[in-house]
């Protein structure tokens, strides 16, 4: 019944791959221009720090509970698992080292960034997408107020500032969780727990690199979240799709960037 | 009604606009005199909102020029556009109130952004603007707590916050109950006369608009089909205009989306052929 | 009212975040044991450094007195050259012995310094001549097995 084109059967799918590739590159270009504009219009945010303080509340303070609770549990799991493994080799005293290094180098920055992406990042996308869908951004523009300067830039800086703080709290909470399990409950020697940890964790190599990681993740997650919101089709489906994309894309970006940063930071040592 | 050059606030001459290959507007000529309320009508997708965006400088015309208060929008840089917009007020289709700010802060938004006025003076001004739309008592509410008509009035108060030279309304009557609709229509007229602004109302609510405006432009398919006073438009014999003004289902604008033969779609034609 | 509450929370948030970083630096990390930063550098050659790493501790009588700054290979003498930063307030005699020790059976390796009786003190750029290499576990085990085998042989005889 239906006349099917025999010769060009594979053509549409090939064409679609090409179109998708071009679309991806286009979006990447737009996203780059977007972050450039955001940085260029950040002056307003610094002239009026109140704008950033307000966003710090919504991105940072509201993410506190999930970050602290998750940090505590991750640390406690590390304490339990680490003890089980280390006790096989009779070196339970290295429990502090294991917990601290895993948290400070990897789990702290990565897990807190993943949580941040799903808690604050998705909220940012939904909020900006909704502002776009309800013409609030157009209204602002018609009132001669640049939405990038007034809406996007303060959120960007709030995200970039909160991420390292949240990651540090996560790691500190995790070490405390490991301490509670290892020292208080299992009974690993407290002195060797802390002293071995302190002699193995270097401030510059481990703690600073962890902070740098979380700073980079903060930039990536906030950038993705804001761009997805700003670029979302102005409909309900558009906004919900953009919110999902924010979580997926920023999670992948966090893990990919983590691999790159780790290979730079710790391979040389 | 032939406005002279000096009394014209917005002058649109021979403007065309296209998204890539798709033409939206072709050869539009329009002039809006100072102090008048002018309606821009047409069915959905006829390019009304695009024309509004051209006046606001959000987009630039492909050919032709848009002059606002003597300035050509294509020649302005973004700072110039922003300077021009400070003298424009716009009411969006559904109000577009900032959902995270209270009614008071919404109205105060532009004053805080653009003027260095002390907070006490801003408070007085906001109260005056809210009073003008009858919502002084609602200044503490959040936009989510307002009804559609109230939200529209708050948005109107916000739009007139800086006493604009031009007020633009993008479908101000959409989705309102008859009472709110009448309230908004009268506010459009009253504010225009008391504040001495010039208003441009984009709408397809014909009857309400014809009652309050001074002059009407009728846009169809990106072309200016007719213009005149409300009386002239009501008396217009062009079938396209007649269909629109009187809301008739059948006319030059077809009710049926272009389709194959009805019989064929019901599979009767197919069976008969087989 | 609303505004000051918001400020309060954000203030608490920033304070807690900085406190987290300070805890990581001092309680978890080695910031507190890094000393004032005033150090002098000496070197030592070892036949075998085992698993010694840069930044390993240098202890004397169990007290941390410095850190290993760099490890390189001396191709003329086929030994490992270890650079050490010692805190300025600690002085050691010229005939100090440096040995590579292990904390516990499988713990981290560090350098232990044992002071001698010389009147002259080590200064920046000096080299410690008396060194003792790391104990290599494989050698120790094979030594142990060899001794046991020899013992067993003796017993039979």
Image: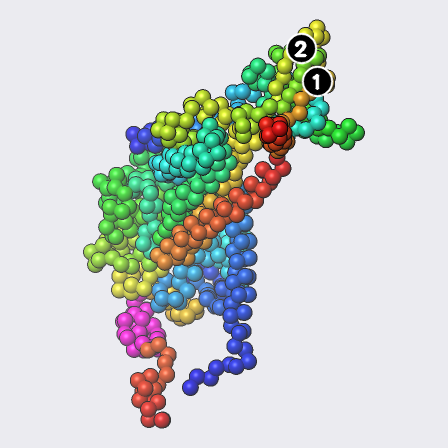
Q: Is residue B59 left or right of residue B120?
A: right
Is B241 colored magenta in this rendering? yes
> In the current view of this chain or complex, which residue is farthest to the front?
C157
> In the current view of this chain or complex, which residue is farthest to the top?
C119
Q: Is residue B9 visible to the viewer in this orientation of the structure? A: no
| Disc 1 element | strand
The disc at residue C111 is: none
Chain where mark 1 sits: C
Image quadrant in which you'd find residue C140: top right
Chain where mark 2 sits: C
Estimate the x, y position of residue B149 in percent, counting from the top left: 25, 52
Estimate the x, y position of residue B101 in percent, counting from the top left: 33, 41
The residue that disc 2 covers is: C116
Estimate the x, y position of residue B77 in percent, counting from the top left: 54, 49
Count of numbered circles in the view: 2
The disc at residue C130 is: 1
Label pair 2/1, CB-CB below 8 angstroms: yes
Estimate the x, y position of residue C43 in percent, counting from the top left: 70, 21
Q: What are the residue bounds of the magenta stretch?
A: B230-255
């Amino acid at each position: 019944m239906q006349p099917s084109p025999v010769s060009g059967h594979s053509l549409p799918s090939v064409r679609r791959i090409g179109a998708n590739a071009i679309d991806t590159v286009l979006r990447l270009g737009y996203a780059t221009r977007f972050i450039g504009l955001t940085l260029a219009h950040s002056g307003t945010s610094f002239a009026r720090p109140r704008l950033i303080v307000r966003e710090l509340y919504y991105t940072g303070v509201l993410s506190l509970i999930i970050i602290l609770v998750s940090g505590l549990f991750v640390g406690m799991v590390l304490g339990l698992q680490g003890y089980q493994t280390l006790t096989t080799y009779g070196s339970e005293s290295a429990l502090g080292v294991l917990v601290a290094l895993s948290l400070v180098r990897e789990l702290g920055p990565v897990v807190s960034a993943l949580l941040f992406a799903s808690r604050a990042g998705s909220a940012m996308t939904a909020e900006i997408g909704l502002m776009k869908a309800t013409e609030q951004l157009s209204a602002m523009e018609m009132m001669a107020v640049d939405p990038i300067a007034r809406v996007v830039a303060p959120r960007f800086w709030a995200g970039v500032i909160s991420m390292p703080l949240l990651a540090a709290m996560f790691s500190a909470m995790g070490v405390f969780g490991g301490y509670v399990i290892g020292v208080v409950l299992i009974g690993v020697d407290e002195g060797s727990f802390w002293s071995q940890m302190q002699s193995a964790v270097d401030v510059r190599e481990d703690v600073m690199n962890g902070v740098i990681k979380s700073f980079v993740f903060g930039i990536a997650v906030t950038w993705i979240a804001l761009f997805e919101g700003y670029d979302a089709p102005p409909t309900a489906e558009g906004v919900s799709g953009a919110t999902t994309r924010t979580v997926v894309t920023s999670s992948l970006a966090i893990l990919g960037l983590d691999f790159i940063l780790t290979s730079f930071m710790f391979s040389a040592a | 009604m032939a406005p002279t050059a000096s009394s014209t606030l917005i002058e649109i001459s021979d403007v065309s606009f296209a998204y890539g290959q798709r033409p939206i507007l072709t050869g539009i000529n329009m002039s809006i005199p100072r102090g008048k309320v002018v309606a821009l009508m047409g069915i959905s997708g006829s390019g009304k909102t695009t024309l509004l965006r051209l006046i606001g400088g959000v987009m630039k015309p492909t050919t032709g020029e848009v002059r606002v208060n003597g300035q050509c929008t294509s020649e302005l840089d973004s700072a110039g556009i922003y300077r021009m917009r400070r003298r424009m007020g716009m009411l969006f289709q559904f109000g577009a109130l900032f959902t995270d700010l209270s009614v008071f802060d919404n109205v105060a938004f532009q004053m805080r952004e653009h003027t260095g006025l002390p907070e006490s003076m801003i408070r007085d001004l906001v109260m005056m603007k809210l009073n003008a739309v009858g919502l002084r008592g609602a200044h503490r509410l959040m936009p989510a707590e307002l009804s559609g008509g109230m939200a529209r009035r708050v948005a109107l108060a916000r739009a007139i916050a800086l006493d604009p030279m031009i007020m633009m309304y993008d479908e101000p009557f959409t989705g309102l109950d008859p009472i709110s609709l009448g309230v908004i229509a009268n506010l459009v007229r009253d504010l225009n006369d008391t504040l001495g602004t010039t208003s441009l109302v984009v709408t397809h609510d014909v009857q309400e608009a014809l009652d309050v405006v001074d002059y009407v432009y009728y846009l169809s398919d990106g072309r200016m089909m007719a213009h005149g006073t409300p009386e002239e438009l009501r008396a217009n014999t062009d079938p396209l205009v007649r269909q629109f003004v009187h809301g008739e289902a059948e006319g030059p604008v077809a009710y049926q989306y272009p389709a194959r033969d009805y019989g064929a779609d019901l599979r009767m034609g197919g069976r008969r052929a087989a | 009212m609303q505004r000051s509450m918001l400020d309060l929370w954000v203030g608490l948030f920033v304070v807690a975040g900085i406190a987290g970083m300070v805890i990581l630096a001092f309680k978890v990390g080695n910031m507190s044991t890094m000393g004032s930063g005033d150090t002098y550098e000496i070197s030592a050659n070892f036949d075998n450094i085992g698993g010694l790493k840069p930044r390993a501790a240098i202890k004397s009588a169990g007290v941390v007195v410095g850190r290993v700054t760099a490890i390189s290979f001396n191709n003329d003498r086929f030994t490992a050259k270890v650079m050490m930063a010692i805190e300025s307030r600690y002085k050691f005699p010229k005939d100090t012995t440096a040995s590579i020790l292990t904390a516990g059976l499988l713990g981290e390796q560090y350098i232990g310094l044992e002071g001698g009786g010389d009147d002259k003190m080590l200064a920046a750029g000096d080299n410690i001549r008396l060194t003792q290499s790391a104990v290599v576990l494989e050698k120790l085990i094979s030594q142990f097995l060899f001794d046991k085998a020899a013992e067993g042989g003796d017993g039979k005889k």
